[in-house]
Image: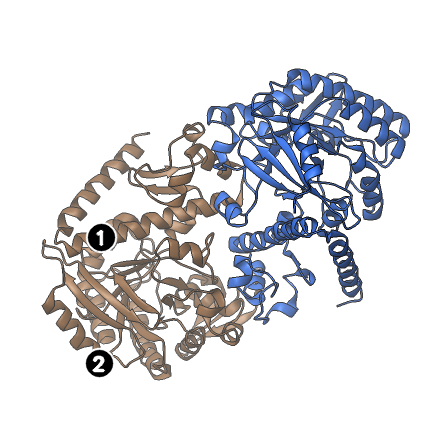
Chain colours: A blue, B brown
């Protein structure tokens, strides 16, 4: 199962990473014709098997479930959001409480974003300069600022295993001139991040931007990857473009990142996105999709999406997904879940979230097995065909 | 630990209960000077150790937790509300799904109320006649009716182990003339309930009303207990009167109920209420207090009540109750729980609910041990002294 050449390459790369930081081990490269990779990211809180999907715990909790549930689901790593946590409860408090791991009682690996993406999403309430970004809190309008230095300071106080560079994710509607200016600034910001970074227990990943412009992506990847870091990410995808455009973009960009480092595609995506981008050599993903959809009653199943409030399920004694082994599917009927959702019961959020997270995490476990067994091309082809058929059936009015 | 005389008496009484229905075993009567009893209610879904507190699962879910959590908490029996379930999802649906136990995946004992209390609480939207009550749904204004026969039909369709007689719980502000009229009607309704009752798998409990009038309570207890039933309840307490008045009322009324049958005090109450009414010989309690307070951030602890949103807990690394062994207290700090609550995270509801239910259920386990060991008088005295001191401290501005 293990590609010796790949592993050797990975380990050679890892010798450049200081002790205490993450270290990527490239275990195997798919031999069935895809760029998919099977890896292992060693972190201060234990190893992560890649490719991996990371549930998002925005404000210090993966909405609807607890750390005990996440362990039962075999979540290997979760995310925290710097923007949300700096505003509430504030990183000094989290630091005093022993860091984010201890504060939320999660002893497995954790990753925080830089806050950049959320701040730049505030559009009306923020201002960008060379120094960084000034913005108003969405909670109370209070004024705050973020800069490369401040973002790294906050993230190191939170103490995640992986921290992200402070970057700008420019809207896809911006013209090329603005994009070029933004990319150059993001590169300068990365150098400031690196300078501010203590290298003590949090590993800094760089972020490549460039929208859907291949030449800009290429140039920015060269600039970012020229900085020796424990990992690299692709930002600026899944921000409004068509899935096909995103898939084509990732197919171009992912191979621009070093082979011996983990490749993280930020904010992606649907099950189909995950499988398709793993094919292009992506190792890490995060997205609020499974948890947010769960709270809205949209459930992912092996037979496609299921909208639990649908009247068709009122008297349906079957589990959400007869092929699923999660607690929700082992224990409850569609009928009961529909009732809970219609009645607005808190338990609906929990049970739906447990199911959707299980679906995403189990999908990635299947992905890892398929890569290890050199049959990922067939796995991805079958998955895509099924997804297309399910979508056609859904649009056909079923 | 077992009082042979008590048990014999219990068993003699039980021979009158048809097989398949509940059977009360009076294990022991406290010998330390109280009327407290240690009992066991045998039900089709297993035994319940009494005195017992029953968490309320209004719409088919104990708000904030699942059946797995309830088992971990060692909840022995939970409640369902006929009024809520008849409106949504409707008892025919629950019946088709195999009954309430199967619908909500709870294989331990269950009790449903008659719907009367909720309907009569609608005040503006209901009309009472000899036949029963006509009312409008609080959900959509649709018109419904309940009667003794209809309530029993619904409850038998839901299929709980214990079902309650359809009664009127008149407001404590009603004059004596109305109360007398209401009590006589509730007695006639009980006879209609008994006639409608199939005796197949659900055991009917009668309900004694009478407000705070001792003579009315006595007369009504005689009327209700003249009907041979598997258990009897006291209704119409904790509906606005002072706790002291309720305690005095229960002290008078509880001994009016048969010694060899379970005595259920409906809708009560605070930890102090439970201990005080167990002293008067009450065996069963239910209340939304622990779950509702949890959702509002009010936590019950061995040191008194704790309002988790209080700024004093922002940086408090201690558990909610250092003396508590629940999952929440074993795992999380006050600081984190305050943050979750302030951020409106769903997990706050769950963790607070787990803690409060643990507090109530563990309190009753302590109560049972104290009775079995003939030291309940001291237990209740100490508990009351501590509660009074805590309340004084709280009012003193701490």
**Vertical placement of A73 versus B37: above or below?**
above
Residue B284 is drawn in which quadrant?
A: bottom left
Q: Chain of mark 2?
A: B
Front-lying residue, A23 or A341: A23
The quadrant of the rendering that contains the N terminus of chain B is: bottom left
CA distance for labels 2 and 1 = 29 Å
Q: Residues within 10 Å of mark 1 (few under 14, many from 20)?
A: many
Are the residues flagged by discs 2 and 1 in contact, CB closer than 8 Å?
no
Left or right: residue B112 compared with residue A138: left
For label 2, the residue is B16
> Judging from the image, what secondary structure is the residue with disc 2 in?
loop
Residue B161 is drawn in which quadrant?
A: bottom left
x, y (%) of residue A358? 59, 53
Left or right: residue B385 compared with residue A50: left
For label 1, the residue is B367
Q: Chain of mark 1?
A: B
* Residue closest to the far front: A4
| Residue A57 visible from this viewpoint | no
Residue for point 72% across, 51% down? A374
| Residue A313 visible from this viewpoint | yes
Q: Residues within 10 Å of mark 2 (few under 14, many from 20)?
A: few
**Vertical placement of A132 versus B267: above or below?**
above
Residue for point 21% across, 44% down? B383
């Amino acid at each position: 199962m293990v590609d010796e050449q790949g592993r050797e390459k990975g380990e050679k790369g890892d010798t450049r990473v200081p002790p205490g930081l993450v270290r990527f081990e490239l275990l195997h490269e798919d031999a069935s014709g895809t760029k998919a990779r099977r890896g292992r990211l060693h972190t201060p809180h234990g190893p992560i098997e890649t490719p991996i999907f990371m549930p998002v715990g925005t404000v210090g909790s993966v909405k609807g479930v607890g750390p005990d549930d996440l362990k039962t689901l075999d979540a290997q790593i979760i995310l925290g959001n710097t923007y949300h946590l700096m505003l509430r409860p504030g990183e000094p408090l989290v630091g005093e409480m022993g860091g984010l791991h201890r504060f939320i009682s999660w002893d497995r690996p954790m990753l925080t974003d830089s806050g950049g993406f959320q701040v730049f999403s505030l559009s009306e309430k923020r201002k960008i300069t060379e120094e960084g970004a000034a913005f108003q809190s969405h909670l109370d309008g209070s004024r705050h600022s973020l800069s490369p230095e401040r973002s790294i300071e906050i993230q190191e106080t939170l103490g995640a295993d992986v921290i992200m560079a402070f970057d700008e994710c420019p809207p896809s509607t911006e013209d090329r001139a603005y994009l070029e200016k933004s990319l150059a600034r993001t590169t300068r910001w990365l150098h400031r991040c690196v300078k501010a970074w203590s290298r003590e227990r949090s590993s800094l990943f760089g972020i490549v931007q460039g929208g859907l412009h291949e030449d800009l992506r290429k140039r920015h990847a060269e600039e970012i990857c020229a900085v020796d870091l424990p990992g690299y990410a692709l930002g600026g995808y899944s921000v409004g473009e068509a899935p096909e455009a995103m898939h084509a973009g990732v197919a171009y960009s992912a191979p621009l990142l070093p082979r011996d480092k983990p490749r993280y595609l930020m904010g992606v995506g649907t099950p189909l996105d995950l499988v398709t981008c793993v094919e292009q050599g992506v190792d890490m993903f995060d997205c609020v999709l499974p948890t947010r959809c769960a709270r809205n009653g949209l459930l992912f199943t092996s037979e496609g999406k299921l909208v639990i409030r649908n009247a068709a399920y009122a008297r349906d004694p079957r589990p959400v997904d007869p092929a699923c082994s999660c607690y929700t599917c082992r224990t409850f009927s569609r009928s009961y879940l529909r009732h809970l959702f219609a009645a607005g019961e808190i338990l609906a959020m929990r049970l739906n979230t447990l199911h959707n997270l299980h679906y995403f995490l189990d999908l990635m476990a299947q992905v890892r097995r398929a890569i290890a067994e050199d049959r990922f091309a067939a796995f991805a082809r079958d998955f895509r065909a099924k997804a297309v058929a399910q979508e056609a059936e859904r649009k056909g009015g079923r």
